[in-house]
Image (spheres, rainbow, N blue to C red):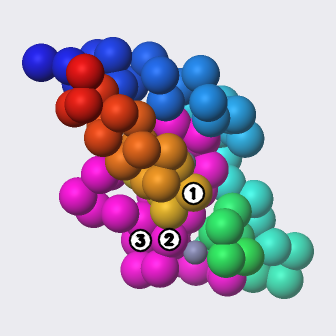
Amino acid sequence: MRSRDTFDKVMKQISRVREPGQSPEEPIDSLEGFVCDLCKDTKVKKEIIQCGFCGRWVCKEGCWDTEIRACESCTGLILLARSENDEE
Ligand SMILES: [Zn+2]
Ligand SMILES: [Zn+2]
């Protein structure tokens, strides 16, 4: 029931890197490739996903947490906010 609180709390702590829907960065030398905002690997479009918290485009394979549904960078903050709320 406190998920909304957690969300608000996390959003205050996370600085947005990109706006929702804003395209990922494309490497100059690749036609269908995009750069993961975290590990900087080049991926095809279906392998990257935009984090709803910070707006980063990250690779699903290495930098995305399917359980939390956030990038690795935001996952730590989300888990921390959740555990703090649980204690209240
Ligand atoms: Zn990555
Ligand atoms: Zn994120």
Q: Which mark is residue 73?
A: 1
- Within the displayed image, which quadrant is ligand 1 positioned in? bottom right
| Secondary structure of residue under mark 2 | loop
Secondary structure of residue under mark 1: helix
- Percent from the top left, x then y, of residue 1? 12, 18
Residues drawn in magenta:
41-69
Check if residue 19 falls in the magenta segment.
Answer: no
Question: Is 29 in front, or is 8?
Answer: 8
Q: Residue at x 29, y 52 (%)?
A: 68
Seen at 42% across and 44% down, the residue is 80
The picture places residue 30, in percent across and down from the top left corner, at 75, 81
Residue type at mark 1: give it: Ser
Which residue sits at x=59%, y=41%?
55
Q: Mark 1 or mark 3: which comes first in sequence?
A: 3
Q: CB of residue at label 2: within 8 Å of ligand 1?
A: yes
Tag 3: Cα neighbours inside 10 Å, few (<14), some, or many (≥20)? some
Discs 2, 3 touching: Cβ within 8 Å: yes
Q: Nearer the viewer, mark 2 or mark 3?
A: 2
In the rendered image, the vertical position of residue 27 relative to residue 72, given as above or below: below
Q: Is mark 1 within 8 Å of ligand 2?
A: yes
- Foreground residue among 78 and 24: 78
Q: Which mark is residue 60?
A: 3
